[in-house]
Image (cartoon, grey):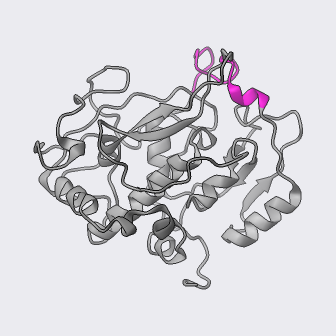
Amino acid sequence: MSSGIGGDNTGCGGGEVSSNVLPVLEGVQPIQGIDGSTGEAIPMGTTLGMREAGDPYRADVVRWAAMDVPSIMKEEDLTRLREEYRIPEDIELILPVPHERACFPRRGCTALHLNAFVSGMRLPLHPMFRRILRAYDLAPTQVAPNGWSQMVGGMNLWFRHSFGMEMPLHVFQSVYQPRKLPRKKGKEEEVGWYYFCPWGSHKPLVTGCPSSIKQWKESWFWVKGNWQRVYDDPEPDLNVPSVYGIASPLPRCELSRENIDVLRSIYEADSKGRSYNFILNRQRCLVELGLVASKGSLFF
């Protein structure tokens, strides 16, 4: 599987930054992390997201908003989910019991939410999404549905405009930064849910995403088994965090000329081709990217 255009994809790829080429690269925001740091990018595939005892950001130390959110999923929902999204049998879908919470993972399990599938996620989980979650130190249910839409849609657009290449991590982190969802008035707990916001004033890669999705936080379940390993996986040891955490700051990276040209091509494309409905509601797009696990019917 190809891993990107221009430079390596193990953090910030080298190359020039051209001002006045795209809004994302015009210098509206400095090249720095969301906490103001300016260090090197986190190399892809390093040991991230595995929290140690005593870490102040561990789920058993922080008061997460998710601690008040039990699952509303039912057994028939999991059956329908497996059938609709063709989830392989070696991946276990487990219904949470009433006292369990997504931020406190059951041993050997990770929480996923139903609307991530609606937004384009598929199982087994594609390596690109594992890289993003691992690099930002986020568990899958910490990413709001629109965050998944930007990850899946951005991957799709890059694939189409780079002639079949995979979007490198350093390109994603140069276009997006994680932002917390607003805290409810009067609440003091750590929200713990994030979306991906474009740097500066430029537009997101994917347009027209739904502005509100009801009960997505409550529609979660446990997953176990071979859900993180695609066929002939290029990074078999890369696992996503299962414990909730504060998003790790990543710097915005300089991009190569080739990367800039691909982004320019995406932003200058017809708006319909960047729309949520066009990208995510077409099974053909997902099959092209290898996001659909089964080899059944490829087209509607």
- Mostly what secondary structure, the magenta segment? loop
Q: Residue at x 35, y 47 (%)?
A: 172
Q: Which residues are magenta?
A: 51-68
Q: Is residue 23 visible?
A: yes
- Assess whether residue 56 is covered by the magenta stretch: yes
Say if 52 sits above or below 6 in the image. Answer: above
Q: Residue at x 56, y 57 (%)?
A: 125
Q: State the residue in front, 185 or 134.
A: 185
Name the spot of residue 159 as percent of width and height, x first. Answer: 34, 66
Q: State the residue in front, 276 or 76.
A: 276
Question: Total label count?
Answer: 0
Q: State the residue in front, 286 or 132.
A: 286
Q: Is residue 164 left or right of residue 229?
A: left
Q: Is residue 1 visible?
A: no
Name the spot of residue 113 as percent of width and height, x first. Answer: 68, 49
Q: Residue at x 56, y 70 (%)?
A: 292
- Assess whether residue 200 is covered by the magenta stretch: no
Name the spot of residue 60 as percent of width and height, x first. Answer: 70, 20
